[in-house]
Amino acid sequence: MLSAAHDILSHEKAPGNQSHVDPGPAPIPHNSSSRFDCNSVSTAAVLLADILPTFIIKLLAPLGLHLLPYSPRVLVSGLCAAGSFVLVAFSRSVGTSLCGVVLASISSGLGEVTFLSLTAFYPRAVISWWSSGTGGAGLLGALSYLGLTQAGLSPRHTLLSMLGIPVLLLASYFFLLTSPEPQDPGGEEEAETAARQPLIGTPELKPGSSSGLSLQERWTVFKGLLRYIIPLVLVYFAEYFINQGLFELLFFRNTSLSHAQQYRWYQMLYQAGVFASRSSLHCCHVRHTWALAALQCLNLGVLLLDMWFSFLPSIYLVFLIILYEGLLGGAAYVNTFHNIALETSDEHREFAMAAACISDTLGISLSGLLALPLHDFLCHLS
């Protein structure tokens, strides 16, 4: 959805035309004389629709959402994902498309809370595998959207071609994922023998390790997590301020790529960096995630200065900065949750995972709220 954000906002339904995401509809009026080639609405609007429902879900998670049975949550997540693709593909207005993005956000938020909590029942090594999977998902989403649209497929048909993904999600959970046996979640070797039966044929997994925690215990655990939560909030604030606030304004006219194509390449390169670093835990373990937050904020500062002074001479230099940005973001994510898994007790781990996953969402939400007025300011200024 974030890769499609520029297309979602670049077109609206005109009489006799197809959906606004198909080729041919009339563009929303935008300031084409601006050096930024601005849309009338920032892509941060799509970001907010994509993240605020997730934020609400993650706020509820530590208060009891993580105590609900897992299977119904996964089913709702899959259905919302499918609904989002259909609604955006057949939408006739930007407002309806944003409703489809909201469905994607519900799917994402509920899915992340559910599966991060579920890792408490498996060996700690699954944190690395989970992070690699989420990085791969981002790369697959961005690369498939870029590749299919570059090949000539319309945005509508590109979105509809993704309907097999929710089906694979449900099939992998109910038929492929195996039920954990009681074990000490220590390392990779245990993963080979920890589970043997598909979840579809076993009694529903019920979270038990954190269900008995009092409010005082939960607050104590949460305070201990702040040294990991705050840096991750800063990392995600900086990178999504770049992604949804600055990407669409980093427009180079001296290249063969159109504005929409440049935006899709930015998204793909960012996701490639995220995938690489989220898969790198066994090669590089970072305990002090504050350093990653500082470097990401430095990236934001450099690109903000370029908004005013235009000192970056080539889009390829921006490509490198965006790839580096993705590497920092992915490393912060995987190392944060790995550190939490190592340092929390078995009794607290399920709650800690559910509580800490609000970090990225809070940072992204704040970035979207600030990116909207920045977009308007820069576009009117130029």
Image (tube, helix red, strand yellow):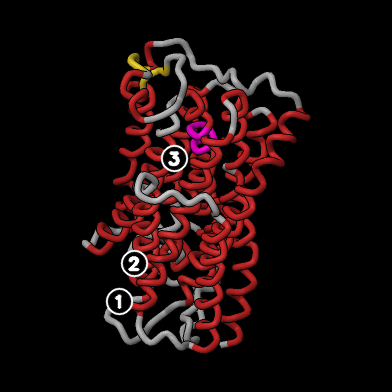
Is residue 17 something that shows in the picture? no
- Amino acid tagged 3: Ala
Determine whether the residue tagged by mark 2 lies in a helix, strand or loop: helix
Badge 3: few (under 14), some or many (20 or more) residues near its Cα, within 10 Å? many
Residue at the disc numbered 3: 81
Determine whether the residue tagged by mark 3 lies in a helix, strand or loop: helix
Picture layout, residue 173 above or below residue 366:
above
Q: Earlier in the sequence, mark 3 or mark 1?
A: 3
Mark seen at residue 265:
2
Q: Nearer the viewer, residue 342 or 39?
A: 342
Quadrant of the drawing holding the C terminus: bottom right
Residue stretch rendered in magenta on the structure = 110-116
- Amino acid tagged 2: Trp
Q: Is residue 333 left or right of residue 167?
A: right
Picture layout, residue 87 above or below residue 12:
above
Badge 2: few (under 14), some or many (20 or more) residues near its Cα, within 10 Å? many
- Amino acid tagged 1: Leu
- Residue located at (62% from left, 30% from top): 351
Residue at the disc numbered 1: 257
Residue 115: in magenta span: yes
